[in-house]
């Protein structure tokens, strides 16, 4: 499916910085107006992603949305791996697990508190859990279908709002770099698109691990760009 957006396109720079102790050399800062480097980060491990039998106790919804100790440590390592990348701001989904990840990264980079933005939230499930459950969504996406659940969002809906925000950030932070902490579905759609693939076909190949980092670039092509 082809979608048109603003004046920027996502270009994949096959770089995965999976938060190791071997930080790469910082790339040169591009000239103003040449685009925006975006470090797309899936939030680190949260209690909601841990099987119930492995949790220390029964947890509230808010507690389940928090990072585990291992998740927090991973977020700190991600921040350390991004030093020297000329990142000027950290953006985050409003979810607690994403905000905690972003806060650890911003602290490691010596930046102000993360900017929380609804554009990077997880997909809205809507009112019909039967059609918006993870199982149902995966089955449809594997079949090349992307229905919109009642009152919820399709994968393309989530991609559209996230990529539109990145296009706006490319103008706001032209020639610089930002970090964006989001969720697996949103990250996978952005990465698949940046690789030049249909977001449904490329979704499973590009679905990121918790706490993983991938670099993409927003570049201007003349006066009108196509986001694949």
Image (cartoon, helix red, strand yellow):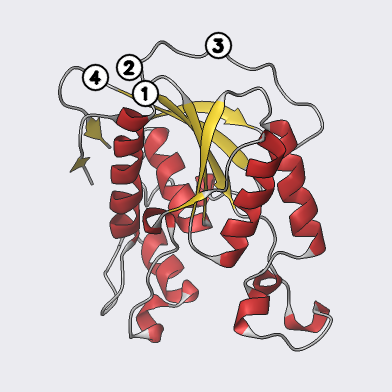
| Residue found at the very far left of the displayed protein | 223
Identify the disc placed on residue 28. Answer: 3
Q: Going from the N terminus, do you reach mark 2 or mark 1 first?
A: 2
Residue 120 seen: yes
Marks 3,1: beta carbons within 8 A: no
- Residue 91 sits above or below residue 83 on the image: below
- Residue in the image at 39% along x and 48% along y: 201
For marks 4 and 1, give the CA distance.
14 Å
Q: How many marks?
A: 4
Closer to the eye: label 3 or 4: 3
Q: Going from the N terminus, do you reach mark 3 or mark 4 first?
A: 3
Residue topped by disc 2: 33
Q: Going from the N terminus, do you reach mark 2 or mark 3 first?
A: 3
Where does the image place residue 205, in percent across and percent down from the top left?
A: 52, 46
50 with respect to 14 (left or right): right
Where does the image place residue 209, in percent across and percent down from the top left?
A: 64, 51
Residue topped by disc 4: 221
Closer to the eye: label 3 or 1: 1
- Residue 126 sits above or below residue 124 on the image: below
Residue 209 seen: no
For marks 3 and 1, give the CA distance.
14 Å
- Residue in the image at 39% along x and 76% along y: 132
For marks 3 and 4, give the CA distance.
21 Å
């Amino acid at each position: 499916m082809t979608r048109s957006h603003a004046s920027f396109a996502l270009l994949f720079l096959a770089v995965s910085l999976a938060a190791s102790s071997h930080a790469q050399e910082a790339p040169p800062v591009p000239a103003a107006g040449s685009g925006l480097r975006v470090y797309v980060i899936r939030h680190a491990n949260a209690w909601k992603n841990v099987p119930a039998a492995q949790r220390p106790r029964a947890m509230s919804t808010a507690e389940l949305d928090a990072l585990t100790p291992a998740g927090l440590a991973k977020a700190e390592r991600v921040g350390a791996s991004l030093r020297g990348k000329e990142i000027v701001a950290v953006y985050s989904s409003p979810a607690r697990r994403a905000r905690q990840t972003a806060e650890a990264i911003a602290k490691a980079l010596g930046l102000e508190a993360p900017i929380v933005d609804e554009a990077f939230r997880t997909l809205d499930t809507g009112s019909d859990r039967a059609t918006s459950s993870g199982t149902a969504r995966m089955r449809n996406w594997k079949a090349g279908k992307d229905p919109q659940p009642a009152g919820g969002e399709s994968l393309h809906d989530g991609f559209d709002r996230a990529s539109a925000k990145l296009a706006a950030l490319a103008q706001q932070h032209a020639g610089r770099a930002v970090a964006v902490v989001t969720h697996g579905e949103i990250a996978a759609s952005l990465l698949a698109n940046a690789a030049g693939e249909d977001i449904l076909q490329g979704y499973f190949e590009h679905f990121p691990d918790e706490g993983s980092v991938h670099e993409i670039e927003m570049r201007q092509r003349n006066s009108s760009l196509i986001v694949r």
